[in-house]
Image (tube, helix red, strand yellow):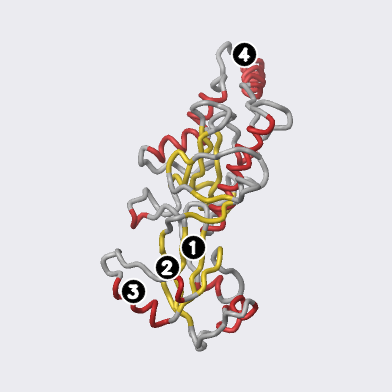
Amino acid sequence: MNITITNTYGTPHHVSATNPAHVTGCDYYRLPLVGTITPGHADYEDMVEMLRDNGHDTREGYGLIFLESEEFSATYFGSIEQIEQYKRDNTDGTARFDPSQGVLYAQWPQGKGWDDYLPRVFWNQAQRGAIADGVGLVTAFAHTEAPGAEVIVYEFEGKWLPDSEPQQLVTYHCTACHKDTFHDCGHVHENTGPASRRWAARQARQHIISAHRHGVGDTNSACRPNNGEMLRVVNALARERLGTTGNALPDTDDVYCATKGPCGIIRELRAGVRPPAYRA
């Protein structure tokens, strides 16, 4: 498909030549975690199994660097000596490491050992100036078919159910159709780290691709504005039951979204204000 998906802010990413929703890497990463593992670790054998399966298990212990961007992540395995030297050199945050000395794997590892070793790391972190951990914008893409619209990926706090505890979540929102992904199964994810962000951003890209392929509003398109249809139904029922003449809710999707939906969250995130937990 001949489509270019443009970041409206954030790091540009490289994508597959045949699938612009599939991110293959980028030029710049954060290095949020640096560590080591040795055979003395209780789960060492399980943790190095991926290296062994690929013929890369050549050391008695490894230095680790975990890389992340808005839409991608990678893990570097090198010598413990290299990583300890990097940590000494990086006290001012300017050191570079030589990836040719070790091996780089796409994604952060998962499974036995790794699930306990790796803490949850959000893109938005209070120590880096964010509103709060796991609260803020991640990236945004210009909508190809609706001038001025964006598809925005963001981290936020929300509840799956009104009586549940707030959780850190990640999803996307399209300002062309204003669909609330809470009502669209599988588009809101528990925000557990780079893999969660990557999946939300992939779905945002797929939304744009669908609009490019089918247009905005087509029955086959993921981007289908309701044009206030449901709001008009709810307002009509409210007027009938309450005997009033005014509307109980805004009568357009964009106004409703700005006051009670994702656009309201995004507006506050952009203003540096911590929104209340969604659906609380």
Instruction: Give percent across and percent down for residue 114.
Output: 55, 73
Q: Nearer the viewer, mark 1 or mark 2?
A: 2
Instruction: Give percent across and percent down for residue 144.
Output: 56, 32
Q: Nearer the viewer, mark 4 or mark 2?
A: 2
Q: Nearer the viewer, mark 2 or mark 3?
A: 3
| Mark pair 3, 4: CA separation | 70 Å
Label 3 environment density (alpha carbons within 10 Å; few <14, some 14–19, many ≥20): some
Please tell me which of labels 1 and 2 falls first in the chain.
2
Give yes or no for contact between labels 1 and 3 (Cβ–Cβ under 8 Å).
no
Q: Secondary structure at mark 1?
A: loop
Instruction: Give percent across and percent down for residue 175.
Output: 53, 31
Q: Amino acid at mark 1?
A: Arg
| Mark pair 2, 3: CA separation | 11 Å
Label 2 environment density (alpha carbons within 10 Å; few <14, some 14–19, many ≥20): some
For label 3, the residue is: 87
Label 1 environment density (alpha carbons within 10 Å; few <14, some 14–19, many ≥20): few
Give yes or no for contact between labels 1 and 2 (Cβ–Cβ under 8 Å).
no
Q: Amino acid at mark 2?
A: Leu
Q: Secondary structure at mark 4?
A: loop
